[in-house]
Image (cartoon, grey):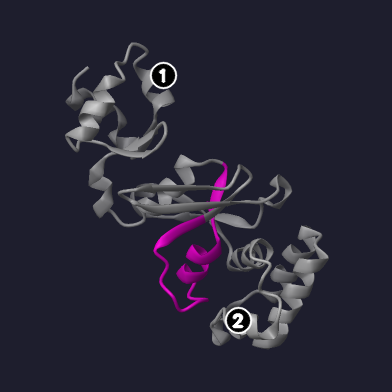
């Protein structure tokens, strides 16, 4: 197996797994991966997942890899809130939620954080179009906000809600309050309901 042939086979995937490699090449010598990583030909994303370094310069691919290297998951929490302009801070860590256990991965494409929620709460996300006809699983603004309040329960006073520094114009004009409250009901959590209604009071939406 030479690298040129390997690259032609897997480049279109952007991110690929060891299982995909063995499916295409059952007799593949795994020491090739070690050698190619050392030479900088491929990047190690997490155990069993790899990518080509070319994709570091391509927009949205770090987000795309978040979906691919830990499934099922979708981008939510701070990354989604920042993307929608709901919070002022830019976010360096790529945050997702998953029905798998909580996990963190660090690689040359970014720092990836996954928070666990119940499988029944894996809803409220959509497919977003990105470069090269690929799609991202991304929380709606309303679900990203509820995921945050649910997974970070220390936001429980008016002062703490103010410290979120939510964009007040977005909350009043762009947030779909009906959808927010519908999603809120699906959580079946009295504590989350209290935090959601407190947020609504603080930001007057």
In the figure, 169 relative to 20: above or below?
below
Residue range (magenta): 72-95
The residue located at (42%, 34%) in the rendering is 47
The residue located at (58%, 79%) in the rendering is 174
* Nearer to the camera, 158 or 137: 158
Q: CA distance from mark 1 to mark 2?
A: 48 Å
Q: Position of residue 147 (x, y in %)?
A: 64, 62
| Within-10-Å neighbours for mark 2: few <14, some 14–19, many 20+ | some
**Any magenta on residue 93?**
yes
The residue located at (21%, 27%) in the rendering is 35
* Nearer to the camera, 58 or 29: 29
127 sits left or right of 61 in the view: right
**Which image quarter: residue 178?**
bottom right
41 sits left or right of 161 in the view: left
Residue 171 is labelled as 2
175 sits left or right of 94 in the view: right
* Nearer to the camera, 62 or 194: 194
**Mark 1 = which residue?**
23
Q: Position of residue 100 (x, y in %)?
A: 61, 42
Mark sitting earlier along the chain (1/2)? 1
């Amino acid at each position: 197996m030479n690298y040129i042939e390997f690259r032609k086979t897997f480049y279109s995937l952007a991110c690929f797994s060891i299982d995909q490699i063995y499916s295409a090449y059952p007799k593949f010598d795994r020491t090739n991966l070690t050698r190619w990583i050392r030479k900088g030909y491929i990047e190690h994303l997490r155990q069993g997942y790899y990518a080509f370094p070319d994709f570091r310069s391509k927009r949205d691919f770090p987000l795309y890899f978040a979906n691919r290297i830990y499934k099922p998951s979708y981008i939510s929490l701070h990354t989604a809130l920042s993307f929608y302009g709901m919070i002022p801070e830019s976010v360096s860590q790529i945050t997702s939620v998953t029905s798998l256990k909580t996990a963190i991965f660090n690689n040359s494409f970014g720092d990836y954080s996954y928070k666990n929620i119940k499988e029944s709460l894996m809803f409220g996300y959509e497919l977003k179009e990105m470069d090269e006809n690929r799609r991202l699983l991304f929380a709606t603004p309303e679900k990203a906000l509820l995921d945050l309040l649910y997974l970070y329960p220390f936001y429980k006073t008016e002062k703490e809600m103010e410290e979120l520094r939510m964009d007040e114009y977005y909350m009043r004009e762009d947030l779909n309050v009906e959808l927010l409250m519908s999603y809120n009901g699906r959580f079946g959590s009295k504590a989350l309901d209290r935090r959601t209604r407190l947020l609504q009071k603080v930001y007057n939406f």
